[in-house]
Image: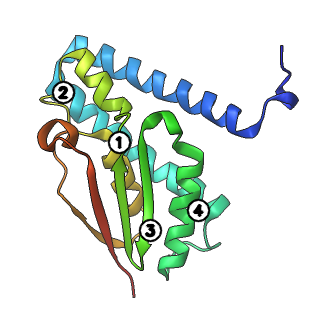
Amino acid sequence: MKTLDEIGIYELRDLLIRNWMTHDGMWFHHCLQELGIEQTNRLNKAAIKSLAKIEIKRAKKIHGPGKDRIDSFQELRQLIEGAFALSVSDFMGATFSFPEEDIMRWEVKDQGCFAYAGMKRLGVIDRYQCGVLYRVFCWIENTGVQFTASPQIDRCLLHTHGKCTGEIRFSLP
């Protein structure tokens, strides 16, 4: 048996993220059973929005530029990469990149999205409103940086478009 000191940081991070996502999935499942998909989507997005405000504030404290305001793409990128490093693990199936100034791209790899798989198992993929990307968008909103996402997200992109890929364009001074 490994002690906490013997467990590597990436193994520990993966375990914590898996536990967090399992809790999130169980919460979604039980809300779905009690309230139906429309109410569960609404509550899920409300929880994500309020959590994102706290998460990005904490991420700014650790990874941010040391001030409230984001003044450059480099500061924003550093903050987002730091937030992803603490919140995204390989099992989630998503990658994010910054191919050029003021652009972030996302893509779900061939293994697929963990949320898509879960919603399919629950039988609600056709009505599920993507919480994964909504969380990222809420993070960015809470930085105060203006952005546009393409495509616009309402339902699960893997379900509606057969792929989950897109980009965010940032408007910074």
Given contact means CB atoms under 8 Å apart, are the residues at marks 3 and 2 in contact?
A: no
Q: Is residue 162 above or below residue 43?
A: below
Structural distance between the alpha carbons of marks 3 and 2: 29 Å
Q: Does label 1 or label 2 sit earlier along the sequence?
A: 2
Q: Given the image, on which type of amino acid does mark 4 rest?
A: Lys
Disc 4 on helix, strand or loop?
A: helix
96 left or right, relative to 6: left
Q: Given the image, on which type of amino acid does mark 2 rest?
A: Ile
Disc 1 on helix, strand or loop?
A: helix
Given contact means CB atoms under 8 Å apart, are the residues at marks 1 and 2 in contact?
A: no
Residue at the bottom extreme of this rendering: 173
Residue 125 numbered mark, or none: 2
Q: Which residue is mark 1?
A: 132
Q: Name the residue nearer the viewer: 45 or 99.
A: 99
| Residue 19 image offset from top left, x and y in percent | 55, 24
Structural distance between the alpha carbons of marks 4 and 2: 33 Å
Q: Which residue is mark 4?
A: 60
Mark 4 or 2: in front is 2
Q: How is the image coloured?
A: rainbow
Q: Does label 4 or label 1 sit earlier along the sequence?
A: 4
Q: Given the image, on which type of amino acid does mark 1 rest?
A: Val
Q: Is residue 59 above or below residue 4?
A: below
- The quadrant of the rendering that contains the N terminus is top right
Q: Which residue is mark 3?
A: 98
44 left or right, relative to 85: left
Q: Does label 3 or label 1 sit earlier along the sequence?
A: 3
